[in-house]
Image (tube, helix red, strand yellow):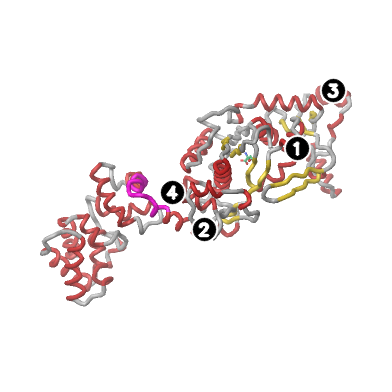
């Protein structure tokens, strides 16, 4: 472990698009491991690919981590002792190291053009040998060198891979060995002087004193190259970071995570009313388990229980159907003020309320009635809209539910009964309606109360009926039932 005993983990995305659930799962595990060990969580933006990374994606990545509650100790906005934490601001550092590797003889200039490389790869394929750089420029003669230079060729910087193999112990996968026959000399710096991922990531992990690299399994094969860079930087084996390659996250139907199913973007879940703590809880279960078949873990418990030993090596599958019930559970755990503050933006965005104190007070009164019934925050709109609309209308699709003769006679009877109740609270309303419709007319509750629900709330999905009528008030409730009778 490098220099000190302190645990330092990093999340190092390349924001060439929105972070997907696989990236976030990695971030979550990094964060949880740092918090579990009392170490530091470093957030580094790998934005050397200036063609594909945009400022917009970077700021969305930052916002996403914030929204999820994955706070970082060092990185964008907070800084830290080993910054800057955007690789685009560290280009000089990578250039200096590349130069050092050249000076030391660990790296060399390679003048092969892409056409030449392609032709030789073709020949390798035909001869059935492992494809990869063949070492042509490892030892150029003076004459060859000056010929290339006078042709105006721009060289790349290539790392020399010695014969042999690289072995390291992955904390999840155990001992992993790469035969260097399959790890050819690799490019560190492009012809235009820009560094490649392998150089930047390894240099930064060393300079930022990263002790543990927890990241997706897709990066396993880049590890021997990174280790080669550590060696060229003068690190001894004992100073290399520990590696833990997290299991792959698959999308539905065992396919790749797909944009179409919304699996790739956390913003998609946020817009649909998923809570950050539900997303984190669910993602935590993708490849890790708290034990005893538990499915509900708080962020606090996650940090208490998270160990790399409990991470499995087999792929995990992202399943939206499992996320929903967890979200419902998390919604039920919220206190009313918290729930109110979370549903308010949805109600404002959907045009249900403007956000006045009176409106918020009324919404708050409905929350105990609906907290049990919703799986996402976005569902609240449909549940409370009836209380706020000024031009109340019964949904088209619900009209048939009150049009038949039986429904009409139920509504008429309800109207007569409610006109004569003296007190407007849910218990009185319920007692009066039960007396008339259930006891008196011998109707089944569904037959009796279904049409009233549609008449009063406009839909067959609503908070409990009698409480809804109490909140709506006597005047508006009676008005709506009367209007439905005339239909
Ligand atoms: N920047 C790399 C990526 O987003 C990951 C770097 C790493 O974790 O080693 O794919």
**Alpha-carbon neighbours of circle 2 within 10 Å: few (<14), some, or many (≥20)?**
few
Q: Position of residue 229 (x, y in %)?
A: 74, 34
* Dominant secondary structure of the residues highlighted in magenta in the image: helix
Which residue is painted at 24% across and 59% down in the image? 467
Q: What residue would you read off at disc 3?
A: 146
**Alpha-carbon neighbours of circle 3 within 10 Å: few (<14), some, or many (≥20)?**
few
Q: What residue would you read off at disc 4?
A: 275
* Relative horizontal placement of residue 115, taking residue 433 as reference (left or right): right
Please tell me which of labels 1 and 4 falls first in the chain: 1
Callout 4: helix, strand or loop?
loop
Callout 2: helix, strand or loop?
loop
Q: Are marks 1 and 2 in contact (CB under 8 Å)?
A: no
Callout 3: helix, strand or loop?
helix
Which residue is painted at 70% across and 33% down in the image? 199
Q: What residue would you read off at disc 2?
A: 294
Mark 2 CB near ligand 1 (8 Å cut): no
Please tell me which of labels 3 and 4 falls first in the chain: 3
Between 208 and 258, the one nearer to me in the picture: 208
Q: What residue would you read off at disc 1?
A: 237
């Amino acid at each position: 472990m490098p220099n000190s005993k302190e645990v330092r983990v990093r999340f190092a995305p390349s924001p060439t698009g929105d972070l997907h659930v696989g990236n976030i799962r990695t971030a979550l595990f990094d964060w949880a491991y740092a918090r579990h060990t009392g170490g530091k969580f470093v957030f580094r933006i790998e934005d050397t690919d200036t063609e594909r990374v945009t400022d917009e994606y970077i700021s969305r990545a930052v916002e996403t981590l914030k929204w999820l509650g994955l706070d970082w100790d060092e990185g964008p906005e907070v800084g830290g002792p080993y910054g800057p934490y955007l690789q685009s601001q560290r280009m000089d550092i990578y250039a200096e190291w590349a130069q050092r590797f050249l000076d030391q003889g660990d790296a060399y200039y390679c003048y092969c053009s892409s056409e030449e490389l392609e032709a030789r790869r073709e020949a390798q394929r035909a001869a059935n040998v492992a494809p990869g750089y063949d070492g042509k420029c490892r030892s150029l003669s003076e004459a060859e060198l000056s010929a290339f230079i006078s042709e105006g060729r721009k060289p790349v910087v290539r790392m020399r891979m010695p014969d042999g193999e690289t072995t390291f112990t992955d904390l999840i996968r155990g001992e992993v060995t790469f035969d260097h026959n399959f790890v050819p000399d690799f490019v560190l710096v492009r012809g235009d002087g820009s560094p490649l991922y392998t150089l930047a990531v390894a240099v930064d992990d060393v300079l930022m004193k990263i002790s543990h690299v927890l990241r997706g399994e897709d990066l396993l094969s880049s590890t021997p190259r990174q280790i080669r860079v550590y060696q060229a930087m003068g690190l001894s084996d004992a100073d290399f970071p520990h590696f833990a390659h997290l299991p792959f996250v698959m999308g539905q139907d065992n396919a790749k995570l797909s944009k179409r199913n919304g699996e790739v973007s956390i913003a998609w879940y946020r817009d649909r009313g998923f809570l950050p703590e539900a997303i984190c809880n669910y993602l935590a279960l993708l490849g890790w388990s708290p034990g005893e078949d538990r499915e509900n873990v708080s962020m606090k418990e996650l940090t208490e229980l998270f160990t790399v030993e409990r991470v499995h090596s087999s792929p995990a599958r992202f399943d939206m159907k499992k996320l929903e019930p967890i979200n419902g559970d998390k919604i039920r755990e919220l206190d009313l003020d918290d729930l109110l503050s979370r549903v308010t933006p949805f109600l404002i965005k959907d045009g249900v309320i403007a956000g006045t104190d009176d409106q918020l007070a009324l919404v708050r009164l409905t929350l105990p009635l609906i907290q049990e019934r919703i799986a996402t925050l976005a569902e609240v709109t449909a549940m409370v809209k009836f209380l706020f609309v000024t031009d109340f209308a019964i949904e088209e699709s619900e009209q048939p539910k009150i049009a038949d003769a039986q429904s009409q006679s139920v509504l008429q009877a309800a109207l007569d009964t409610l006109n004569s109740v003296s007190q407007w609270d849910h218990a009185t309303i319920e007692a009066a309606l039960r007396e008339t419709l259930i006891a008196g007319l011998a109707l089944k509750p569904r037959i009796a109360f279904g049409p009233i629900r549609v008449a009063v709330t406009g839909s067959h999905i609503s908070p409990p009926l009698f409480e809804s009528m109490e909140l709506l008030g006597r005047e508006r409730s009676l008005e709506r039932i009367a209007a439905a009778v005339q239909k």
